[in-house]
Image: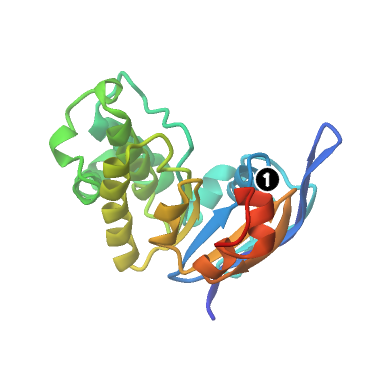
Amino acid sequence: MDVVLDTQGLRKSFGGVLVIDDLSISVNRGEALGIVGPNGAGKTTWFNLITGAVRVDGGKVIFEGRDITHLPRYERCRAGIGRTFQIPRPFTGMTVFENVLVGATHGRNQSEHASYEHCVDVLERVGLAKKMNVLAGSLTLLERKRLELARALATDPTLLLLDEIAGGLTEAEVQELLQEIRKLRETGITIVWIEHVVHALLAIADRVTVINFGRKLCEGQPREVMNSAEVQACYMGGTPA
């Protein structure tokens, strides 16, 4: 397998509380890896360690065969790691196009002029082309989620990290978003998706990893993992289906 991302023995504490405890997870090129676990399990912290939002206390982050453990965030982004956040925070006083342009120019380190066509293409891919001249502050939640995705895609990532992008959406909106993510998969992009809307995750993921108390609990085929007794006990709070 061609491994794109390999986090080796990561550790992170906050105020004496161990949040990530010897966590090792690998992601293969072109796959969609789902990440699940209870609140406070360390899932988003793991993303933050990958992107450089927080510093590791121990272990390594290897991306495309390169040790990026101590690289600054902007260098990781330009190396090919894109990411969305749980709560979209667009520049509300800027247009949708301008928001995406920020991602393209700073994330790809290219001039505005060279990025125009790329930004239009990205907006078409996520279904926001008709909204490109609208102020981001006027968007609905689903549209903000799409914009969050567009800003990440504007950086032209090899690896896309999705953090609860389906959270807060109606079932119909989740299905719309799934269509966009399926299209992204067809382009060959590697996806790692943290999500509590489990049925959405199962519709996309090739493999699922469960994190609990900052450690890997188990991983494998999505439905087998979610129906395992240990996952039902820690994550679903019930018995196997």
Q: Position of residue 80 (x, y in %)?
A: 47, 57
Q: Is residue 227 visible?
A: yes
User: Residue 179: horizontal and vertical position, in percent?
Assistant: 26, 55
For this orientation, the residue located farthest to the bottom is: 1
In this picture, is 14 found above or below 196? above
Q: Mark 1 sits on what residue?
A: 42
Residue 50: percent from left, percent from top? 61, 51
Horizontal side, residue 177 vs residue 161: left or right: left
Left or right: 174, with 213 as reference point: left
Residues 167 and 19: in front is 167
Which residue occupies the extreme top position in the image? 93
- Residue at 40%, 43% in the rendered image: 166
- The residue positioned 32% from the left and 45% from the top of the image is 174
Mark 1 residue type: Gly
Q: Is residue 4 above or below residue 167?
A: below
**Which element type, helix, strand or loop, lies under badge 1?**
loop
Query: How many discs appear?
Result: 1
Quadrant placement of the C terminus: bottom right
Q: Position of residue 100 (x, y in %)?
A: 31, 38
The residue located at (36%, 24%) in the rendering is 91
The quarter in which the N terminus is drawn is bottom right
Q: Residue at x 27, y 60 (%)?
A: 183
Q: Is residue 68 visible from the viewing direction of this image?
A: no
Considering depth in this image, is 199 or 178 the residue closer to the camera? Answer: 199
> In terms of image quadrants, where is residue 123?
top left
Please state if 233 lies on the left or on the right of 161 as rendered.
Answer: right
